[in-house]
Image (tube, rainbow, N blue to C red):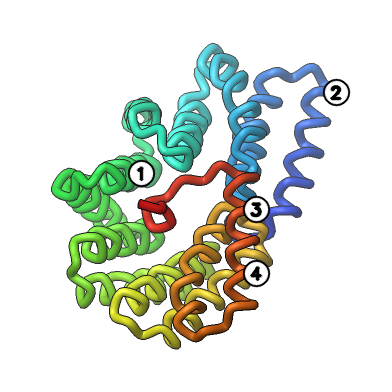
Amino acid sequence: QVERASGFLERSQDWAERAQASAQGRGDAVGEALVAVELGRTRMNQGDYDVAIDLLTPALPVLDAAGEDVAAGEAHRTLAILHMARGRWAESTDAFERALLRFGAVGGAVKAGFCRVGLAQVARHQKRYDAAREQLNAAREGFEAIGYRMGRAECANGLGEIARMTGDLSTAERCYRDALALYEELGSIDVPVAQANLGLVQSARGDWMGARQSLDSSRRMLALEQRRDLEAAACAALLAPTAAARDFDAFDRCLARALDLLERTGFVYSDIAIE
């Protein structure tokens, strides 16, 4: 968990696979299912969606039977994120709601808050902006009540997304900068996410040089962390500022990389959709 949260996904995968082998060797089905949740989350962060789903799906009935509500909730939440990444909005909503029920039953305030953040993301993708704000505000109140800064960062980033998508670029920039400051303070894996979002604001304003710098910095970090789905999004977002700079060789490289990663991961996101 520590390695994954710090962005060292290969190390996280190595530790999880060792634990999985140990559980299998002991015939510990519950232990194997618990490890599958962690390994599934790591493979999701690497953009290996199909592998993650294959790990999580058989783990859920084992966790249910063992009464492992927290781990089952985490499995549902991870599946919800995977469905969202594939554009399966109904399945994602259902899985987030199942996770929210599990975490609510065991007093998991932080994890329940992240489920609300996820429900807000789904609503935002569906352009249900009022519903998205409602979920984020509820999550933010819960995070602030317990002083949880990572949750506050997620809410700030989510509110920035809503503001940007509704044309309020000043509010979007302020929210993204708030999120970036918190991510940097906490050493979060999501620093490049906020950087990329600031790059999208710069692109919307026609600041092509600034956008290219922000997005390329984000892309480099995501590539280093092997977060293939988000690297694909950063590459796609780089196309407009790279074309504006008339750097067509770099444009071709970005396009080829984006298409390759999108085909490999099946990632779906409104900012990189071709309409």
Q: What amino acid is labelled 2 in the image?
A: Gly
Sequence-first tag of 2 and 4: 2
Q: Is residue 4 visible?
A: yes
Q: Nearer the viewer, mark 3 or mark 1?
A: 3
Real-space Cα separation, disc 3 to disc 2, in angstroms? 37 Å
Q: For numbered disc 2, what is the local secondary structure?
A: helix
Q: For numbered disc 1, what is the local secondary structure?
A: helix
Q: Which residue is mark 4?
A: 253
CB contact under 8 Å: marks 1 and 4: no
Q: Nearer the viewer, mark 2 or mark 4?
A: 4
CB contact under 8 Å: marks 3 and 2: no
Q: Nearer the viewer, mark 2 or mark 1?
A: 1
Sequence-first tag of 2 and 1: 2
CB contact under 8 Å: marks 2 and 1: no
**Residue 260 disc label:** 3
Q: For numbered disc 3, what is the local secondary structure?
A: helix
Residue sitting nearer the eye, 143 or 80:
80
Q: Residue at x 36, y 85 (%)?
A: 207
